[in-house]
Image: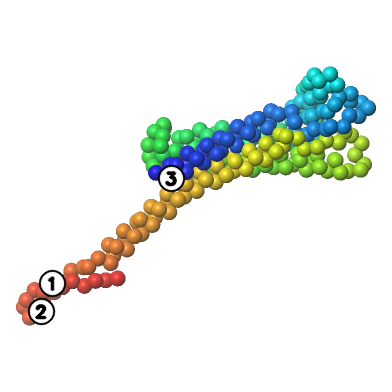
């Protein structure tokens, strides 16, 4: 019962991280700038992985997609690939985890098979969390390097809201996978301890020995440890 509750909590935790990362991936606020330059007549501008947005002096928001995705900087393309990989891994891990939960009867009924599915789902959640963590941290490092570089002539941005959401989602993602994997390992340890205790108790039980002494059959109990 405790293992089932831990699995459900771990899956909910991972799904929360999956949802946050999905919102972060589609957000246009990976980096923001509050300073208006000569070429940009807007109060502030923001940019995401797929498009950039600007708020004009009249309060209207104007967003446009990148004309050529392959012309973007290398770290942006890498972050796109890592975030998409993280989402795909999370989707596969969710399906495998649902099949591996002890409280579900979908798919497998074998206990060992369910445990393998749950462990695989947990590892995929951890891998997806690491991919998103690398993407968000890499993007944040590039923004910080450009901001403090005195020779950088472009628009200097600051960390956007989507990056903080990405970090939070990655942590929940990874924790959910760790808890899901540990719940299955705890069950294995418990079974091993019970079997070892049963074997030790049976080995220490009194044994009967029958031998002949002076033409009489004698039954004696001797305890072996």
Query: Foreground mark, 1 or 3?
Result: 3
**Spot occupied by residue 151 in the image (x, y as percentages of width and height):** 92, 41
**Contact, mark 1 vs mark 2 (Cβ under 8 Å):** no
**Spot occupied by residue 66 in the image (x, y as percentages of width and height):** 79, 24
How many neighbours does mark 2 have within 10 angstroms: few (below 14), some (14-19), or many (20 or more)? few
Helix or strand or loop: what does disc 2 sit on? strand
Q: CA distance from mark 1 to mark 3?
A: 48 Å
Q: Which residue is mark 1?
A: 219
Q: Measuring 50% from the left and 43% from the top, which residue is drawn there?
A: 180
What mark, if any, has residue 3 been given in the picture?
3
Residue 26 in which image quadrant: top right
Is residue 19 depicted above or below 204 in this figure? above
Q: Which residue is mark 2?
A: 213
Residue furthest to the bottom in view is 214
- Quadrant into which the N terminus falls: top left
- Quadrant into which the C terminus falls: bottom left
**Spot occupied by residue 183 in the image (x, y as percentages of width and height):** 47, 47
């Amino acid at each position: 019962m405790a293992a089932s509750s831990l699995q459900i909590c771990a899956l909910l935790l991972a799904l929360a991280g999956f949802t946050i990362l999905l919102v972060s991936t589609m957000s246009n606020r990976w980096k923001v700038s509050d300073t208006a330059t000569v070429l940009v007549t807007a109060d502030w501008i923001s940019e995401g992985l797929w498009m950039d947005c600007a708020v004009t002096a009249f309060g209207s928001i104007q967003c446009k997609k990148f004309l050529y995705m392959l012309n973007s900087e290398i770290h942006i393309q890498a972050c796109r690939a890592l975030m998409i990989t993280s989402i795909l891994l999370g989707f596969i891990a969710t399906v495998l985890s649902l099949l591996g939960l002890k409280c579900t009867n979908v798919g497998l009924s074998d206990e060992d098979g369910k445990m393998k599915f749950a462990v695989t789902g947990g590892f995929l959640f951890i891998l997806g969390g690491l991919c998103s963590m690398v993407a968000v941290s890499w993007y944040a490092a590039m923004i910080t390097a450009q901001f403090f570089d005195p020779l950088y002539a472009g628009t200097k941005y600051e960390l956007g809201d989507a990056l903080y959401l990405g970090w939070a989602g990655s942590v929940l993602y990874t924790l959910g996978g760790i808890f899901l994997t540990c719940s299955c390992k705890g069950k294995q340890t418990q079974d091993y301890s019970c079997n070892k205790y049963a074997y030790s108790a049976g080995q220490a039980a009194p044994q009967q020995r029958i031998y002949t002494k002076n033409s009489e059959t004698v039954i004696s109990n001797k305890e072996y440890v």
